[in-house]
């Protein structure tokens, strides 16, 4: 992509109405646009990041057998009354609206109810189980606080997977697989090293739920981590009893700020009982399906990456989710230099290397460098009179201080050899 054609422009000034670093950098870089408090639009560069994160999640969900669906966001009052989750006194973040005939409806903040009901059409016998279904779908939540940029918004895409098993034993097996899939996702997105499996409050069917908490000062949660074991306890369940229960010792636990990037939960038969989702066992009796739910917010992940990896010059995207892998800059107006840069751009495209080409005229080198740092592509290539004097191209990684000159021949080999995360 040519940067001269990109309709978004970077901004030098920070927005005055943002307190979070992720929103500030993402808005300045033109990744997102703020509609109102807690409501953001995704622009071309931001959408690329979001889609790449979604694809990593999708691959890992498919790998554990998840089947993708897409449910409606419009919710029927009667359905949610059956599980006692319609009342605003009980669920305080509903957005609700009405049909023209005054029938009330809700905008989904989660999808346990409709998906459980839907499965009544398809689950009859023990032979139909186990399986899991997931979606990427907009959730609406009337969040009280919306000061964390894209990490907590009032409309957001969630990947939510639901598992349907015959019994607790079968569920536990799937749950472990899901846990491993989650670990892979956070690794691949580039925050594996700061993400901790965290014990949080469970429900009737299990003592704990598991959150995946990423360390960042921008997080709203407090957790206690055991660095050696790589696990943590959420403050909400942090008691002497729980510490002992998990075989941890208080002296080793360190208090940290973190953000919940994902969450897995044993639902048991809470929903299948309320909505009568049953199957016939081998012996011929009727049993409730045993369920679990597994959520991740791709935009929250994106915000977390910005918060955790950025430096004072801007964003640093991991290769796996960067909008473009390479940012190619041409400096100055010299015809030979421009010709060389165009040649390299064409060659990168031919070799299917994702590249943003800063071909904008009337821009000082300083402005171009500042934009490249702000936008955060992993590899910066510079073609200038100086680099050409050294008969090459300057290659610098965003997370390294110094670059090096490489020849045109070396360049492609180098880019091909670079491991793609
Ligand atoms: P939190 O405790 O942070 O409010 P939650 O426990 O309500 O989140 P879940 O209902 O488990 O969140 O949602 C699953 C995932 O969706 C979360 O782990 C998070 O990644 C993401 N998520 C939740 N709320 C938001 C939001 N308001 N904006 C963006 N992502 C969100
Ligand atoms: Mg939570």
Image (spheres, rainbow, N blue to C red):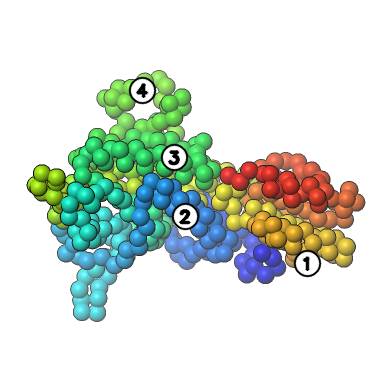
- Spatial distance from mark 3 to mark 1, Cα to Cα? 44 Å
Q: Secondary structure at mark 4?
A: loop
Closest to the camera, between mark 3 and mark 1, is: 3
Q: Residue under circle 3?
A: 183
Q: Nearer the viewer, mark 4 or mark 3?
A: 3
CA neighbours of label 4 inside 10 A, class few (<14), some (14 to 19), many (20+) = some
Q: How many marks?
A: 4
Q: For the residues marked 4 and 3, what is the alpha-carbon distance in whole angstroms?
A: 21 Å
Mark 4 or mark 1: whose residue is earlier in sequence = 4
Query: Which quarter shows the C terminus?
Result: top right
User: Element under label 3?
Assistant: helix
Q: Residue at x 40, y 20 (%)?
A: 251
Along the polypeptide, which appears first: circle 4 or circle 3? 3
Measuring from the top left, give residue 241's x and y in whole percent.
Answer: 26, 25
Q: Are marks 2 and 4 in contact (CB under 8 Å)?
A: no
Residue 411 horizontal side relative to residue 317, left or right: right
Outermost residue on the bottom side: it is: 100
Residue 168 horizontal/vertical position (percent): 22, 39
**Can residue 254 be seen in the rendering of this structure?**
no
Return the x and y of residue 250 as percentages of the image width and height: 37, 22
Residue that label 2 marks: 54
């Amino acid at each position: 992509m040519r940067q001269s054609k990109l309709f978004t422009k970077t901004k030098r000034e920070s927005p005055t109405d943002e307190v979070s670093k992720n929103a500030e950098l993402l808005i300045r870089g033109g990744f997102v646009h703020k509609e109102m408090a807690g409501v953001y639009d995704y622009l071309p560069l931001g959408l690329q990041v979001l889609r790449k994160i979604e694809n990593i999640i999708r691959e890992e969900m498919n790998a554990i057998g998840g089947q993708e669906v897409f449910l409606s966001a419009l919710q029927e009052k009667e359905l949610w009354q059956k599980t006692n989750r319609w009342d605003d006194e009980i669920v305080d973040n509903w957005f609700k609206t009405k049909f023209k005939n005054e029938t009330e409806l809700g905008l989904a903040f989660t999808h346990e109810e409709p998906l459980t009901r839907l499965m009544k059409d398809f689950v009859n016998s023990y032979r139909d189980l186990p399986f899991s279904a997931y979606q990427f779908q907009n959730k609406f939540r009337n969040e009280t606080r919306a000061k964390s940029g894209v990490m907590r918004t009032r409309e957001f895409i969630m990947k939510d997977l639901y598992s349907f098993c015959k019994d607790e034993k079968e569920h536990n097996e799937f749950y472990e697989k899901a846990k491993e899939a989650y670990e892979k996702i956070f690794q691949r997105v580039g925050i594996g090293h700061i993400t901790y499996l965290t014990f949080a409050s469970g429900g009737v069917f299990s003592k704990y739920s598991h959150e995946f908490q990423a360390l960042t000062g921008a997080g709203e949660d407090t957790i206690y981590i055991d660095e050696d074991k790589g696990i943590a306890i959420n403050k909400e369940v942090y008691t002497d009893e729980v510490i002992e229960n998990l075989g941890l010792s208080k002296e080793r636990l360190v208090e940290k700020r973190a953000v919940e990037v994902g969450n897995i939960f044993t639902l048991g038969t809470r929903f299948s009982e309320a909505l009568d989702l049953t199957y016939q066992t081998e012996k011929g009796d009727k049993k409730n399906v045993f369920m679990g739910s597994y959520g991740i917010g791709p935009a929250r992940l994106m915000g977390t990456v910005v918060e955790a990896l950025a430096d004072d010059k801007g964003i640093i995207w991991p290769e796996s989710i960067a909008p473009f892998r390479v940012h190619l800059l041409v400096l100055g107006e010299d015809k030979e230099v421009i010709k060389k840069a165009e040649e390299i751009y064409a060659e990168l495209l031919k070799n299917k290397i994702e590249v943003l080409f800063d071909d904008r005229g009337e821009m000082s080198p300083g402005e171009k460098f500042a934009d490249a740092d702000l936008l955060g592509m992993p590899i910066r290539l510079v073609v200038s009179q100086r680099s050409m004097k050294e008969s090459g191209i300057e290659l610098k990684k965003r997370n390294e201080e110094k670059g090096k000159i490489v020849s045109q021949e070396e360049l492609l080999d180098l880019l091909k050899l670079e491991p793609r995360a």
